[in-house]
Image: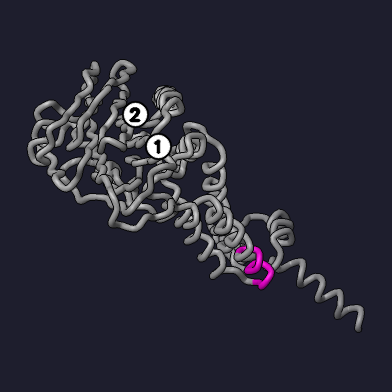
Amino acid sequence: MYRMGIQRRVSRRRSTPGIGSPTRYIVSIMTLRDTDPRALADRTVRVAKTQWTQRGGWAWLFGGLALVAHGLVVVSLIISTAVTEQIASLLPQVFLLGLILHAMAVGLARTRQALARAVGVIGIVVVFVALVLAPWNQPDRAAAGGPSLRITTYNSYFKNAKPPSLEQTDVIGLQEITRGELDTVARDMGADFTFLSQCQCTASGTEVGLVSRYEITDATYFDDGGSGTFIRATLTLSPAETIVIYVAHLPSPEDHSARDRRNHLIDVIMGEIDKEAGDVVLLGDIGTTIYSPTFRTLKSDLNLQSVDYGLVTPCSWYGYGPLLCLRIDHILISSGLRIVESSVGPDQGSDHRAVSATITW
């Protein structure tokens, strides 16, 4: 009787498909004949859902997506390519997305071991990003009160019908600007000195200008044929202090060709700045964000400081809207200069915002 009971339980288990084991279920449905396809499909979906839930499928899915997002962040901070630079441009957004996905994975984790793995990965990524973009990488701030210079960079945008209003500054580097707009800015500032590059501008507008309250000397410009240009000029601030200003408008790295042109222009600028003996300021639409390896190489090789640097940095370009805004307008200064304060201006009709900084020496 005991043996017969065992046999009955075994035969019942074989004859009734269960949903506890996918393998047993597959074997069972292979032995069935004349099975309704719709019922079979419904039963298969139920098995899949049950197994997905029991094995923490959602936690693994969100965890995997979080790893992908944070992996892209790490790679874009190390390797410079056309693809990784696009990711680096949106690094804060991708990093935040990774944290959200990780939080969802942690919330759905079914075991302490899975929870510990998820939290550990979050910790590793956060530490890595902090080491690259930590607050201690910010430039030292100088106290106000000494001699100072207020500098602004602004891409006016060639389709902008609203003339820029940038009175509260001493020196302005302008991009996508016409002679009339340049003269309007100079008149509003009460500035006596202007310089405008005479590049062969494309329809998108690459003209670069400089307006200054201080005398401009030795002003020259470089033009690569319309897709990018920069100005080099000397400003005499006092009989004892002069600085060299570079105002640049470089191509955005939208494809490999544009990236190569931009990198070529950056190499040319770096070669020129490397020859300078005194204080230097590089400003303008550089065509790269602070998170890209290209930007960090530019800073480190020339020993320049950026007026803003870190994971939380104000945007200056809103061409993709507020959620996907970028920081591609920069002011960088040499080691002999120090930053008092910096700011990003309001909307003035352009897709860019003015970036300003007060510096001292």
x, y (%) of residue 143? Answer: 34, 58
- Disc 1 crowd, CA 10 A, few/some/many (<14, 14-19, 20+): many
- Identify which residue, 116 or 286, lies in the foreground: 286
Disc 1 + disc 2, Cβ < 8 Å: yes
Looking at the rendered image, the quarter that the N terminus falls into is bottom right
The residue to which callout 1 is attached is 288
- Residue 103 among magenta residues: no
x, y (%) of residue 101? Answer: 50, 59
- Disc 2 crowd, CA 10 A, few/some/many (<14, 14-19, 20+): many
Q: Residue placed at 23% from the left, 22% from the top?
A: 197
> Magenta residues: mostly which secondary structure?
helix
- Residue 114 among magenta residues: yes
x, y (%) of residue 112? Answer: 66, 73
User: Is residue 316 at all visible to an observer of this figure?
Assistant: yes
Q: Earlier in the sequence, mark 1 or mark 2?
A: 2
Please tell me whether residue 284 is drawn above or below residue 40 in the rendered image. above
| Residue at the outermost front position | 239
Residue stretch rendered in magenta on the structure:
111-118
Q: Quadrant of residue 213?
A: top left
Q: Residue placed at 76% from the left, 72% from the top?
A: 12
Display coloring: one colour
Q: Could you tell me the amino acid type at mark 1?
A: Thr
User: Is residue 44 at all visible to an observer of this figure?
Assistant: no
Residue 250: mark in rendering: 2
Mark 2 lies on a secondary structure that is loop
How far apart marks 1 and 2 lie (CA) works out to: 9 Å
- Identify which residue, 251 or 103, lies in the foreground: 251
Q: Is residue 206 left or right of residue 140?
A: left
- Identify which residue, 207 or 218, lies in the foreground: 218
Q: Residue placed at 58% from the left, 58% from the top?
A: 127
Mark 1 lies on a secondary structure that is loop
Q: Could you tell me the amino acid type at mark 2?
A: Leu
